Image (cartoon, helix red, strand yellow):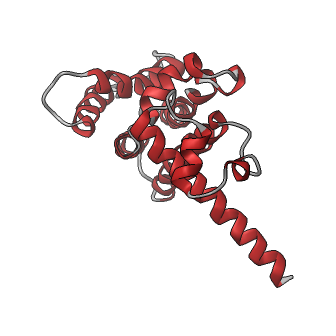
């Protein structure tokens, strides 16, 4: 029993080591220029070990992005438990997402370009993009149901606008930080979707 627990713990450690190494390599080299060999060299593990945990670098990318989605979802749930308004939750979730994307700079370009570089379309950009939209969409729907958020604008459109803020901020030429850019864009968007009736 104890041996099995140690084995499972070691497997989890190896898996996390590979994920951490991949994040570093994607950040440094870019997704397209990173090979499994690069990842495993950084992880200080044999290339064969990679395939005990992942089938491809695309699968590693999916795991890294899903971890970010999970952190944002956790932040949203914590705010819901505090009975924050939908508008407050959207603001906090957007700023937290910007913080995570700023810390994991390789993610945002990959959300836009993974499909071009992937030989596995089922793990490409289409699989990566909806995560943030879904999180925002759920909060927006609750806000519309409670009367906080305008219901004359379709919730999918509002969610798409929140999702696109990060892309717009990443291409911005304004002399402000990525996080501040997102914060200001979110403020403008929130002012526009408030139900003023």
Q: Is residue 82 left or right of residue 195?
A: right
30, above or below 120, in the image: below
Q: Is residue 130 left or right of residue 150?
A: right
The quadrant of the picture occupied by the C terminus is top left
Q: Residue at x 48, y 21 (%)?
A: 112
Q: Residue at x 62, y 57 (%)?
A: 45
Q: Closest to the observer: 120 or 133?
A: 120
Q: Is residue 47 left or right of residue 40?
A: right
x, y (%) of residue 83? Answer: 46, 54
Q: Residue at x 67, y 48 (%)?
A: 47
The image quadrant that residue 115 belongs to is: top right
Q: Is residue 38 left or right of residue 166?
A: right
Q: Closest to the observer: 185 or 118?
A: 118
x, y (%) of residue 177? Answer: 20, 37
188, above or below 61, in the image: above
Q: Residue furthest left?
A: 175
x, y (%) of residue 130? Answer: 58, 27
Q: Is residue 186 visible?
A: yes
The quadrant of the picture occupied by the N terminus is bottom right
Q: Closest to the observer: 149 or 4?
A: 4
Callout count: 0
x, y (%) of residue 78? Answer: 49, 57
Q: Is residue 90 visible?
A: no
The image quadrant that residue 38 belongs to is: top right
Q: Residue at x 15, y 24 (%)?
A: 174
Q: Closest to the observer: 65 or 88?
A: 65
């Amino acid at each position: 029993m104890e041996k099995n627990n140690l084995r499972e713990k070691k497997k989890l450690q190896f898996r996390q080591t590979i994920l951490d190494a991949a994040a570093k390599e994607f950040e440094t080299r870019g997704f397209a220029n990173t090979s499994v060999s690069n990842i495993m060299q950084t992880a200080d593990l044999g290339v064969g070990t990679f395939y005990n945990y992942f089938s491809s670098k695309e699968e590693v990318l999916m795991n890294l992005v899903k971890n970010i989605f999970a952190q944002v979802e956790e932040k949203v749930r914590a705010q819901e438990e505090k009975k924050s308004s939908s508008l407050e939750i959207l603001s906090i979730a957007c700023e937290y997402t910007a913080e995570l994307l700023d810390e994991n700079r390789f993610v945002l370009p990959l959300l836009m370009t993974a499909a071009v570089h992937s030989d596995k379309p089922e793990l490409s950009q289409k699989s990566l993009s909806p995560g943030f939209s879904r999180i925002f969409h759920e909060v927006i729907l609750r806000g519309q149901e409670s009367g906080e958020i305008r219901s004359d604008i379709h919730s999918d459109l509002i969610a798409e606008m929140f999702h696109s803020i990060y892309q717009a901020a990443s291409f911005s030429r304004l002399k402000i930080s990525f996080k501040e850019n997102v914060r200001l864009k979110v403020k403008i968007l929130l002012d526009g979707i408030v139900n003023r009736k």
